[in-house]
Image: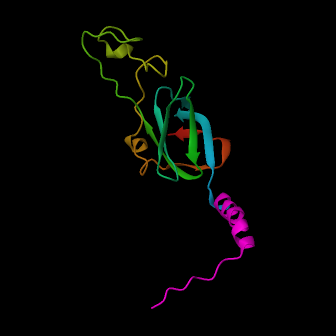
Amino acid sequence: MIWQRPASVPQSALRQLPLALALLVAGCAPGIGNVTGKVTYQGKPLGGVTVIFFDAKNMTLRDTTKADGSYSITKAAAGNAKIAILVPMDIPMKGMEMPGMGKGSPEKGTSEKGGGAGKLPTVPAKYADKDSSGLTCEVKAGNQQHDIILE
C-alpha cells in the first residue's frame, strides 16, 4: 500500500482558527465572582464563624466573619454555590489564659476573631453541612452582595 498525502486545508481557514477558538472559549467560560455580605443569626451579627462556599467547580473558598458579621469570598466560579457555616468550638482549658477570656472560666468566653462578648452562639448543626444547610448563592461574574440569614 502506498501512503498518500492528505488534502491540505486552505491557509485562510487556518488563519481564522485562533479567532474561532478564542470566541468559543470566551463564550463558554463561566466567569469569576466575588461575594461579600453579612451573616446574622436570630437577627444579630454572627462574628468569628467560618463561611465556606462550595462553588460551581466544587472548590472550597472560606472566610472568617468580622465582629459585625461581614465576610468576603473572592474568586468563586460563577454558578450555584452551596454554603456551610462553621462555629468554632468553645473549649475552656483549666489553668490556661486565652486572649479575651478569664483564666479557665468559660462563662467569660468570647469569640477571638468575632470580638463579641459572651459565649459563642449555639447555631443549629445543619448549617455546618453544605448539603443540609439549605444555604446557596447564585454567584455571578464580578462583585455582588449576599447576606446569609440563619434562624
77 or 45: which is nearer to us?
Answer: 77
Q: Residue furthest bottom?
A: 1
> Residue 151, relative to residue 16: is it above or below?
above
- Most foreground residue, 64 or 118: 64
Residue at the far front in the pictured view:
2
From the viewer's perspective, is residue 56 above or below residue 4? above
Q: Which corner quadrant of the image does residue 92 belong to? A: top left
- The magenta-colored residue range is 1-26
Q: Quadrant of the N terminus?
A: bottom left
**Horizontal arrangement in the rendering, residue 89 relative to residue 14 (left or right):** left
**Is 74 placed left or right of 21 in the picture?**
left
Task: Work out whether residue 6 can be spotted.
Answer: yes
**Would you say residue 43 sits in the magenta stretch?**
no
Asked whether 14 falls inside the magenta stretch, the response is yes
- Tell me residue 79's x, y (percent): 58, 54
The image shows residue 100, relative to residue 146, as above or below, that is: above
Q: Residue at x 46, y 33 (%)?
A: 50
Q: Check the image and name the residue furthest to the left.
A: 94
Query: Taking 98 as reference, is 146 left or right?
Result: right
Q: Nearer the viewer, residue 53 or 39?
A: 53
Look at the image and tell me whether residue 146 can be seen.
Answer: no
Magenta segment main secondary structure: helix
